[in-house]
Amino acid sequence: MDTKRNTSNDERPLAFHDVPFINSEEGRPLRILAEYLEPLERLKREKIHDTIVFFGSARMKEGGEFSRFYEDARMLAKNLTNWSLSLPGNNRFVICSGGAGGIMEAANRGAAEAGGRTIGFNIGLPHEQRPNSFVTPELLFEFHYFFMRKLWFSHLAKALIVFPGGFGTLDEMMEILTLVQTQKLDREITILLYGQDYWREILNMDALVKYKMIDVSDLSLFQYVDNVDEAFTLLKSRLPQEPTTYTPSIAKSRTC
């Protein structure tokens, strides 16, 4: 379809060619929808069905104070990708991160070193958030809206590994835990908190149970792990190995 009008100089363009309108306050719903539909189309085209998501701080650099977590994330992503490539469907589970530095870079790097494709859901921020060079180019996404980025983290995830992190990591982790707790996802997600000492100090889950803010059964929604072998073994035993046949679709819960 020809979307361009034969216009004289004083006629306005079609609304979807009107860049000032698209970037205006009134155009915000269109921008939000675009951040859902463009990734949807691209992930379908690339036949991405299932992801293993890595969360963690952008500040944990290679060779830095907490470099062991960087190296562990890198090795775990590499091991998972090697395993995934051996399953029916070839690269059955695709490593996914926020696409920037630190733990995100480590996860994408490990997957790339194993020869697999790897996803980066990046977001534009004033500091820290620049895409790393290990994301598969056709699977690098740039978001403006945090909530749309978080939707895509959860939408295809079959497992989540949460390395130590700050506000962003806590926000993303709690979003997934809430969706699982309230059964707003149509599948099971294995959630591992990597680095037991860190997470038990940062989050007193037992206190939440004590004060009846969560049920004791909610503690089973996640598990602590402390090393690559432990995490790898758990994930291999819990992830479904039969290929997923559907392609990404409109996000839905267990009831809709």
Image (tube, helix red, strand yellow):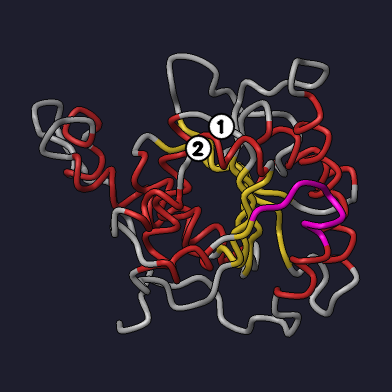
**Where residue 54 appears, x then y in whole percent?**
64, 47
**Residue 139 seen by the camera:** no
Residue 249 sits above or below residue 112 on the image = below
In the picture provided, is 254 more to the left or to the right than 161? left
When asked about the image quadrant of residue 21, the answer is: top left
Query: For the residue carrying disc 1, how many other residues have a C-alpha within 10 Å: few (<14), some (14-19), or many (20+)?
Result: many
Q: Are marks 2 and 1 in contact (CB under 8 Å)?
A: yes
For disc 1, the marked residue is: 165
In the picture provided, is 70 more to the left or to the right than 184? right
Mark 1 element type: loop
Decide which of 80, 218 is in the foreground and name it.
Answer: 218
- Residue type beneath disc 1: Gly
Q: CA distance from mark 2 to mark 1?
A: 5 Å
- Is 141 one of the magenta-colored residues? no
- Residue type beneath disc 2: Thr
Mark 2 element type: helix
Decide which of 68, 36 is in the foreground and name it.
Answer: 68
Q: Quadrant of the N terminus?
A: bottom left
At a point 66% along the width and 58% down the height, the residue shown is: 52
At a point 37% along the width and 74% down the height, the residue shown is: 183
What mark, if any, has residue 169 been given in the picture? 2
Decide which of 55, 114 is in the foreground and name it.
Answer: 55
Q: Residue furthest front?
A: 210
- Is 226 one of the magenta-colored residues? yes
The magenta stretch spans which residues?
Answer: 224-232
When asked about the image quadrant of residue 252, the answer is: bottom left
**Residue 244 seen by the camera:** yes
**Where residue 117 appears, x then y in whole percent?**
76, 52
In the picture provided, is 165 more to the left or to the right than 173? right
